[in-house]
Image: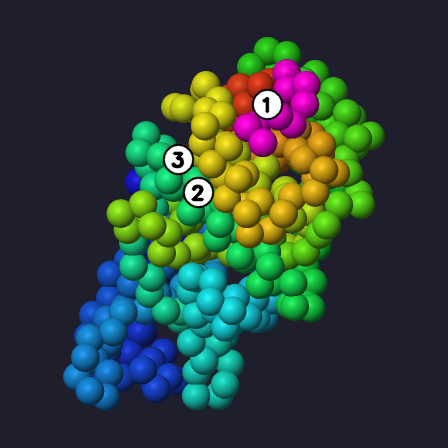
Amino acid sequence: MYLAVYTTLSDNDIEKLLENYDLGTFQQAFGIAEGVENTNYLILVLDAHANEQKYILTVYEKRVRPEDLPFFMGMLEHLTRHGVPCPKPIAAKDGSPIQTLLGKPVTIVSFLQGRGCRNSGIQSQHLQELGKHTALMHNAIAGFTPRRENNLSVSGWKQLQEKIGPRADEIEKGLTALLAEEMQYLKQHWPTHLPAGVIHADLFPDNVFYIDQKLTGIIDFYFSCNDILIYDLAIIINAWCFEQQREFNVTKARALLREYHAVRPISNAELEALPILCRGAALRFLLTRAYDWLNPVEGAVVTPKDPMEYVRKLRFHQSVKQHGEYGL
């Protein structure tokens, strides 16, 4: 479990913030000890009818740019209007969902029931639900016009690869060469004319909530950006479809792709691009993990994640000859 309370809030701090809202009377708050990027609190409030209501208060730390918050909040508002189970931003009395507390931007959003999956507990039913809801999300976001570029696509990967440089061999001998060769290959072969739109870009098991294998919520949209729609599925395949981060489970991948396809049909061009998109997704998380592994933040309590998990996944995707090996 990751300790993600970087900014400690007192009850008085939260009560002062809630004066900007029409939510009711503050009762208590609990720091949420999961996550990596921001500080999150569960806050309990008594509404005008003396009913207890739950909300999530987020304090945005250094990795989220304040200028990106209107995009994220606008997207969540759009998705909730279209029935996608994600947090609904709560507007303050001034009409804005973005406020300031202790000099940092903060938001309050609705509370979602359920909990994230542990890798060892992921079943095909989870992937069926995720495939369906990812397609619904992609369809729903089609009418959302603001844009945010993906800073962690090909050009961003190249910058990370150059920053890591020969130090990659400190993680595993030969990794420097692997990163350089794969970066060159992806730069030459990355598709540019596939259907695109706003994607989640971080659909890992801890960002999707379930109750009894039924999907109840999708959270943590702070990597969302405009990119190739099917790239979201490539990220999911990497994050959900390997047993203990090693053996590829084609049954889970098939469940994901079939349910997505039933809601938003996947074109032949998208299917043919799936192997290279999976390679790109593996490289993206390999690079960010390798960089964090080699550059730990002094005093941080979050343990860097193992980059070698994504070396193994990348090598699997490199061995894939055609998209049918993913189950569809």
Label 2 amino acid? Gln
Q: Which badge, 1 or 2, comes first in the chain's sequence?
A: 2
Q: Position of residue 318 (x, y in %)?
A: 65, 19
Label 1 amino acid? Glu
Marks 1/3: CA–CA distance: 17 Å
Locate residue 47: give its quadrant. Answer: bottom left
Locate residue 191: give its quadrant. Answer: top right
Q: How is the image coloured?
A: rainbow
Q: Residue under circle 3?
A: 124
Marks 2/3: CA–CA distance: 6 Å
Q: In the drawing, what numbered circle is on residue 128? A: 2
- Which range of residues does the magenta coloring cover? 318-328
Marks 1/2: CA–CA distance: 18 Å
In the structure shown, which secondary structural element does the residue marked by tag 3 occupy? helix
In front of the other: 163 or 150: 150
- In which quadrant will I find the N terminus? top left
Tell me: 250 left or right of 165.
left
**Mark 2, other Cα within 10 Å: few <14 / some 14–19 / many ≥20:** many
Label 3 amino acid? Ser
Give above or below for 5 relative to 204: below
Q: Position of residue 144 (x, y in %)?
A: 64, 68
Residue 142: say if magenta: no
Check if mark 2's residue and mark 3's residue have beta carbons within 8 Å.
Answer: yes
In the structure shown, which secondary structural element does the residue marked by tag 2 occupy? helix
